[in-house]
Amino acid sequence: MTPLFSALFDSLDKRMKLKGPTRQAANKVFPANWSFLLGEVATISFGVLVATGIFLTLFYRASTDPVVYTGSNEFFNGVTLPAAFESVIRLSDDIPGGLFVRRVHRAASHLFIATIVLHMLRIIMTGAFRKPRELNYHVGIGLLTVSLAEGFLGYSLPYDSLAGTGIRVAYSIVLSIPYVGENVAFWVFGGEFPTGDIIPRFQALHVFVLPLVISGLIAVHVAILIRQKHTQMPKPDVDGHTYIVGKPLWPGQFAESTTLFLWVGGLLALSSTLIPWSDVELLGPYLPGEVGNNAQPDWFLFWTDGLLRALPPFEFTILGGTFNTVFVAGAVIPGIMFGLLIAYPFLERKVYKLEGDWHVLTNPLDIPLRGAMVMGTFSFVLLASANATNDILSRMIGIPIETMVWVFRLSMLFAPPLLAYAVYRYSKQRLIETGSRVATNEQEAQSRFDASQVSG
């Protein structure tokens, strides 16, 4: 620290008594493993989203009212467009730097959600959700859920042809909820689709409400993390239950995080220069009477679109409520999957009678149930996501779309449970060959890890 900063800090410390807490924060240890940086990348991406979003909000018009575009885009010049779409075209072609900022915003949104998904996958696979971190795990699930909703709203705001189709699908899902669907759809969308209230409401949620919720969840997530300390990978002859091996916040982790920030910013800028993220000019405005067959949502919602395409049409009535394909595919199955994610920490603890606190991560193959759950759930999501492109695949490889639908239906029905069972049996066999069972406490797991390192 330079003499000037030292004098300033000493002066501030005399008034605020900061040395103790600052020294404690500076000495906080961060595990030395790249996978722990996924959460930091997500946080950096969220900061970029907020900064670029403020700029975009200055020029965006939250309305579907028809307006005549008069600008430098020759294709749309003099054409009547929905105001939201027109403002995006004007922002892209007539505002200096507007297209670049919009692309950075779009790229950051993809990176934000992708790193949250990967971070969540690491937490589940390594068992970082176990006691005492169940609460923070559930905060993370809430963060993932709100981020997916925020991504969908941002995808909808340009009101291009894909966005309008996505809004129509979301309206259909809400409308399909038995007994209360019509009322909920009216509250959310402001009437029967398409209504002029949709875009203003979506903008309010996207710009004000959900960013505040995400900010709050990130703050709670980090606060709990600081209070409980990090987990860490197992290391030979290191009591991970008591110690963390890694770098202190100052200066090691601070330098690494600063480098990471510069890399993320540079890559977002480079990708926004080279990749035409969300080129709405090629898509055109949303016209309710014109829906393309190749309309797909963003990648993180492929699986929900794949579910809607996979289930055969059906409808039945119980006690006056109508249950149909859209409700089951769009609400029931996603609800079951998120319910499984929420319940899994308690399920694993009860099945294996786990005891005490866990601070050291484990191989998912050491816990057969966890390996099976991860394989079954994520193979199902991947197959459902692939099914969202069945029309494109049909054209590419020349197989009739009807055949493709059945291929994916059967694959989604049988492949995930078979893969989950195979992983479960393999994990059990590993335990049998080593003459052991699932460790019920962290000390037992550490002893086995040390023994495996000696024998290996």
Image: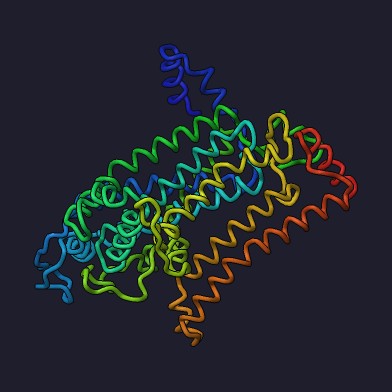
Image-quadrant location for residue 109: bottom left
Judge whether residue 403 can be spotted in this image.
Answer: yes
Judge whether residue 269 can be spotted in this image.
Answer: no
Q: Provide residue 433's location: percent of width, then percent of height.
A: 88, 53
Q: Residue at x 68, y 34 (%)?
A: 359
Residue 306 vertical placement versus 112 (above, below)? below
Image-quadrant location for residue 289: bottom left
Q: Which residue occupies the extreme bottom position in the image? A: 398
Q: Which residue occupies the extreme front position in the image? A: 319
Which of 326 and 238 lies nearest the eye of the viewer?
326
Which of 283 and 174 lies nearest the eye of the viewer?
174
Q: In the rendered picture of this protein, how many numbered marks are placed on residues?
A: 0
Q: Provide residue 314's location: percent of width, then percent of height.
A: 42, 66
Q: Is residue 216 left or right of residue 350?
A: left
Q: Provide residue 94's location: percent of width, then percent of height.
A: 18, 64
Q: Is residue 27 left or right of residue 435?
A: left
Q: Residue at x 54, y 33 (%)?
A: 135
Q: Which residue occupies the extreme top position in the image? A: 14
Q: Residue at x 59, y 62 (%)?
A: 379
Q: Provide residue 288's location: percent of width, then percent of height.
A: 22, 68
Which of 385 and 150 lies nearest the eye of the viewer?
385
**How is this picture coloured?**
rainbow
Residue 330 vertical placement versus 212 (above, below)? below
